[in-house]
Image (cartoon, helix red, strand yellow):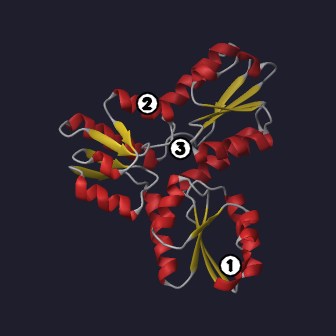
Amino acid sequence: MPVIRIAEEAGACYGVERALAMVEAAVAKGGAPVKTLGPLIHNPRVVNSLKHQGVSVVDSASDAAGAALLLRTHGVTPEEERIARDQCAKVMDATCPFVKKAHAAAELLAKEGYAVYVVGEAGHPEVEATLAHVPGSIAINSADDVEKYAKALRQARRIGLIVQTTMSASRLNEVVSATLPLAEEVRVMNTICEATAGHQDSCRRLAQQSDVMIVIGGRISANTTRLAEIASQYCPRTHHIEGPDELLANWFEGAENIGITAGASTPESHIKSVYQAIATMVGAN
């Protein structure tokens, strides 16, 4: 009978749990309609559940005028926050504390005269919010991006690197190694959050012991996608799903060890439901 294991560190992190508690409290209190600026977290199933509770998503703070507005966990630009506080009945800041730490680190580096680069995915809400805290900063996601901006990096001479909180340590090392030959000084503020590092290490260990890996979380979630990438390096039979309804029985044929992990935006209840569905499929109840 197959053995099913859940990674030691998996599922919702402190920042996500804090944000969900905030939105639940706002709904329970009643009063002004509750809205979130962008998806509160990158988990479509959770966002859809909130929608059924009356919590809607808006694309801009001005679309929430008069409402109670939660600023998403990934952070917002200073301009978005200013508009929110000017126009909304109430503003609740659900920005993850680790993201706020990255904002502060970026501002500190700029103040000390470094040219600031954010190691992360251009266009991702967290990265865009961090860039907005230091006008003129640039996102670089790989050694290829470093080569793309090589001329600017050489001219800057003093480079400050901030990291998207969900970035992998290996990607950060890749960018740092490519940047070092181009500058007189490179200062790295490692703003990868503790939960991300723990999730990734646990995922790596479990994948090495597993015939099949199931990674649970939103497909738009950067940290969950990263877990799927890591798992795939050690366990080719890795599947990224959002819920138990996506599981297929043939994934587990011949498997003796099945591993489960989940992104930082995945509630424990989602992990339990997937575990139970797999147990039923493979007869491990």
Q: Is residue 61 above or below residue 116?
A: above
Of residues 224 and 195, the one nearer the viewer is: 224
Q: Which residue is mark 2?
A: 48
Q: Which residue is mark 3?
A: 264
Provide the secondary structure element on which disc 1 rests.
helix
Q: Are marks 3 and 2 in contact (CB under 8 Å)?
A: no
Residue appearing at x 75%, y 22% in the figure: 251
Q: Are marks 1 and 3 in contact (CB under 8 Å)?
A: no
Residue type (three-letter) at the residue carrying disc 1: Leu
Q: Which residue is mark 1?
A: 153
Q: On the picture, is 58 further left or further right than 124?
A: left
Of residues 152 and 52, the one nearer the viewer is: 152
Question: Along the polypeptide, which appears first: circle 1 or circle 2?
Answer: 2
Residue type (three-letter) at the residue carrying disc 3: Ala
Residue appearing at x 21%, y 46% in the figure: 66
Q: Residues within 10 Å of mark 3 (few under 14, many from 20)?
A: many
Q: Nearer the viewer, mark 1 or mark 3?
A: 1
